Amino acid sequence: AQKITQTQPGMFVQEKEAVTLDCTYDTSDQSYGLFWYKQPSSGEMIFLIYQGSYDEQNATEGRYSLNFQKARKSANLVISASQLGDSAMYFCAMREGPRNYGQNFVFGPGTRLSVLP
Amino acid sequence: GAVVSQHPSRVICKSGTSVKIECRSLDFQATTMFWYRQFPKQSLMLMATSNEGSKATYEQGVEKDKFLINHASLTLSTLTVTSAHPEDSSFYICSALPQGALQETQYFGPGTRLLVL
């Protein structure tokens, strides 16, 4: 079974508008972390935002916010005021278990976001 | 801070040759580094977890004799693709987990594009 599901293979958004990228996850652990990364065409993976399973507040980082709904096991990324430079692949990832050395991430299949001028 | 470099960024080699890829954490120490492979239009797949001073842990289906990993210091891990074949052509990305429990994310290198002719 897929641990991370991103149901939108591709998304379009008009410049300056907000967009939500969906992510649902599957884990039986009580302690876990959720991450979003951006991968532009150059290939580098850019860390955007993190949400811990015990964090009560939704994480925010500038124009990025994470809509964390624990009961639904969803961790959607919201990008406000989209910019042309936001066009990229976006990956949702999960670290199962508490913070520790050697914990690997599981990545979702990704969503390609295209920002239209 | 938290910069990870990879070298080379791009390599083309003949079938049957070996290729070494270096992953360095430039401004932090990393007890653990991860090696991922990404095929075109796909997500990142973890190949192995590299721990400084000990043997790497390989994911199921990854041949440890083909993908040799050495993590000789807290800032350097190497991946050697031995007797490379065209099907090994891919984008290889490393990441490093900073030493210390407060860090929440892996930091990724820029990736290495391998083309085996």
Image: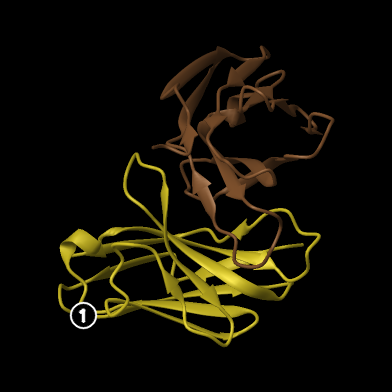
User: In the shown orientation, is residue B35 left or right of residue B116?
Assistant: right
Residue at left offset 74%, top offset 27%: A65
Examine the rendered structure and indicate whether residue B38 appears above or below residue A24: below
Looking at the rendered structure, the kind of residue marked 1 is Thr
Q: Colour of chain A?
A: brown
Residue at left offset 32%, top offset 76%: B64
SS at mark 1 in the image: loop
Residue at left offset 34%, top offset 39%: B41
Q: How is the image coloured?
A: by chain
User: In the shown orientation, is residue A64 left or right of residue A3?
Assistant: right
Front position in the image: B11 or A67: A67
Q: Which residue is mark 1?
A: B17
Across and down, in percent, residue B48 comes to 44, 67
Q: Colour of chain B?
A: yellow
What is the quadrant of residue A21 in the picture?
Answer: top right
Please rate how many residues cluster around mark 1, counting C-alpha atoms within 10 Å: few if below 14, some from 14 to 19, many from 20: few
Across and down, in percent, residue B114 comes to 31, 63
Residue at left offset 16%, top offset 78%: B16
Examine the rendered structure and indicate whether residue A18 appears above or below residue B109: above
What is the quadrant of residue B98 in the picture?
Answer: bottom right
Across and down, in percent, residue A56 comes to 84, 32
Chain ID for label 1?
B
Quadrant of the image containing the C terminus of chain A: top right
Examine the rendered structure and indicate whether residue B62 appears above or below residue B79: above
Examine the rendered structure and indicate whether residue A115 appears above or below residue B22: above
Across and down, in percent, residue B81 comes to 30, 75
Quadrant of the image containing the N terminus of chain A: top left
Count of marks placed on residues? 1
